[in-house]
């Protein structure tokens, strides 16, 4: 695996990703995105943006006798951004858009270098590795099932709260990111990071606890946070135990 990561094949993939990031963010104006949302396929900036993507892909690839790689990525980028222009501009659409770009880049790279590497065997090797599967299951559990468990556990106290002033679903996403960070810290044996998270969360909520108007809400959030932390730490230790056996 280390030889593969150090090979020229993998370096090409990294260069293609750099070209995509530069073209999709640094060399794309916000006004172009707005124009696409209004005019869709009639937007001239869409074609200019796709041309820039193709040019950067060609330059960064280093394979100047090959044109199908930049042309194929230009076509896929055009179709993906055109599809995106008909969708609501939110985080889900953005994530789907970037995920599609990433998958297409990986597949284009794979088909270009397939004579030198066996990408399928590498993927199957990962899926057949017990340690990788344990880590994948651990992250899936702390993202989704843990959220449902915390919601069920804190439900008896939720009725005591008044009308919430917070952002819609913000608490759920904060909890997910917290558990991801904690599990990552446990798997990396970086327990000081967990202590920092607990301290930071406590400091942020200290003022609310002392305020009688917000005391119930602050206690409810801290209760959910503690349960979230305990679950993530527990799953992390279980995963580490299984990995080492």
Image (cartoon, rainbow, N blue to C red):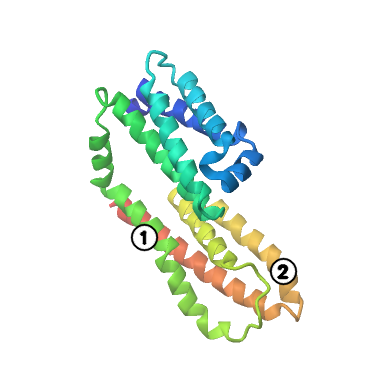
Mark 1 Cα-neighbour bin, 10 Å: few <14, some 14–19, many ≥20: few
- Whether label 1 touches label 2, CB < 8 Å: no
**Image location (x, y in percent) of residue 152:** 46, 78
Q: Which mark is residue 33?
A: none
Name the residue located 28 percent from the left edge and 43 percent from the top edge: 126
Outermost residue toward the front in this view: 42
Q: Nearer the viewer, residue 32 or 220?
A: 32
Q: Nearer the viewer, residue 141 or 93?
A: 93
**Mark 1 highlights which residue?**
238
Q: Give the vertical position of 235 relative to 80 (above or below).
A: below
**Image location (x, y in percent) of residue 151:** 49, 75
**Residue 189 appears in view:** no
**Residue 132 appears in view:** yes
Q: Is residue 76 left or right of residue 33?
A: left
Outermost residue toward the top in this view: 65
**Image location (x, y in percent) of residue 22:** 56, 31
Name the residue located 41 percent from the left edge and 26 percent from the top edge: 71
**Mark 2 highlights which residue?**
206
Query: Helix or strand or loop: what does disc 2 sit on?
Result: helix
User: Which of the two labelled residues, at mark 1 and mark 2, occupies the earlier sequence position?
Assistant: 2
Name the residue located 70 percent from the left edge and 79 percent from the top edge: 215
Name the residue located 55 percent from the left edge and 72 percent from the top edge: 224
Q: Give the vertical position of 19 relative to 245 (above or below).
A: above
């Amino acid at each position: 695996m280390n030889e593969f990561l150090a090979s020229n094949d993998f370096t090409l993939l990294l260069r293609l990703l750099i070209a995509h990031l530069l073209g999709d963010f640094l060399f794309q104006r916000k006004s172009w995105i707005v124009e696409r949302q209004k005019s869709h396929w009639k937007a001239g900036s869409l074609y200019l943006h796709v041309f820039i993507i193709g040019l950067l892909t060609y330059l960064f690839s280093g394979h100047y006798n090959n044109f199908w790689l930049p042309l194929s990525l230009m076509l896929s980028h055009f179709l993906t951004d055109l599809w995106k222009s008909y969708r609501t501009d939110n985080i889900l659409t953005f994530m789907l858009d970037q995920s599609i770009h990433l998958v297409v880049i990986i597949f284009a790279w794979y088909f270009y270098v397939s004579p030198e590497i066996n990408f399928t065997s590498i993927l199957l090797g990962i899926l057949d590795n017990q340690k990788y599967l344990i880590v994948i299951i651990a992250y899936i559990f702390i993202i989704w099932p843990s959220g449902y468990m915390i919601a069920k556990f804190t439900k008896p106290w939720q009725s005591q709260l008044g009308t919430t002033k917070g952002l819609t679903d913000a608490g759920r996403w904060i909890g997910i990111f917290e558990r991801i960070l904690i599990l990552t810290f446990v798997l990396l044996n970086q327990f000081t990071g967990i202590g920092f998270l607990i301290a930071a969360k406590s400091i942020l909520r200290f003022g609310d606890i002392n305020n009688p108007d917000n005391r119930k809400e602050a206690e409810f959030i801290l209760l959910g946070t503690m349960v979230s932390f305990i679950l993530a730490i527990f799953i992390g230790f279980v995963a580490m135990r299984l990995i080492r056996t």
